[in-house]
Amino acid sequence: MDTDGSSRRGVILGGLALGLTAPACAQAQPRIRPDLYNGELDYLSKEFPGRAEDLSASITIAGASEPGERMAISGRCLSWQDGKPAAGVIVYAYHTDTTGSYAGGPRGTRHARLRGWMRTGADGRYAFTSIKPAPYPDRTMPAHIHFIVLEPNRRPYWIDDIVFNGEFKVDATYRTAMELRGGDGIIPLRKTNTIWTGARDIKLERHPA
């Protein structure tokens, strides 16, 4: 007697009786991170100039006069519910200069000098040009770009930094320690002419009700 087969059929038929298919039963909802929010982030994500509605989806963080190799990063913000592009999401990015320093931001603030805010359109896209950052002088971390996300009517939250695959300290130990906030932050860089290019889609987090 095929007791195992009968049990499997019973589970499947039970799911169908509830109006669920087998794939739907297997799809788990993403968990809500208990440490999703951090109040210290308000000063970073919300102190943009002007109104949120005036922010562009594509910006320049470091101009042509900034020392360093040119870099262009782009991607999309995607809903955690259905993976569709999310509009009106503010993405705040900041990083070090070629010496590994954040210094030189506005007096009286904790902002880095090389920073910027973007706001996604209907296609969910954001993009910025800058220079390729350097690791901290103490060499404790790989070169990285910090990201904070501010969704409409939500509190801001960190996502995993962008780091560059195959570069200093981006190794198995680093990958194991990743929390995958906002998806995978390890991206490849490719050089086209004189510009490093990379892409990172952001999987938005599930929020408390």
Image: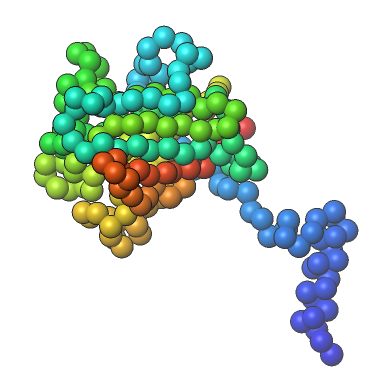
**Residue at position x 21%, y 38% from top?**
69
Left or right: residue 158 compared with residue 25: left
**Residue at position x 58%, y 32% from top?**
123
Q: Position of residue 105 (x, y in %)?
A: 21, 20
**Residue at position x 79%, y 68% from top?**
11
Give the camera-side residue of 154 and 100: 100
Give the camera-side residue of 94 and 25: 94
Left or right: residue 8 compared with residue 29: right
Where on the picture, by quarter, is residue 28? bottom right
Instruction: For residue 142, say whether it is visible.
Output: yes
**Residue at position x 37%, y 31% from top?**
128
Q: From what the image shows, is residue 169 above or below residue 109?
A: below
Left or right: residue 203 compared with residue 29: left
Q: From what the image shows, is residue 26 above or below residue 49?
A: below
Q: From what the image shows, is residue 116 above or below residue 26?
A: above
Give the camera-side residue of 152 and 125: 125
Q: Position of residue 35 (x, y in %)?
A: 44, 39
Q: Outermost residue toward the top?
A: 50
Which quadrant does the C terminus fall into?
A: top right
Q: From what the image shows, is residue 54 above or below residue 6?
A: above
Q: Position of residue 122 (x, y in %)?
A: 60, 28
Q: Position of residue 106 (x, y in %)?
A: 22, 15
Instruction: For residue 163, say whether it is visible.
Output: no
Q: Outermost residue toward the right?
A: 17
Give the camera-side residue of 59 and 95: 59
Which quadrant does the N terminus fall into?
A: bottom right
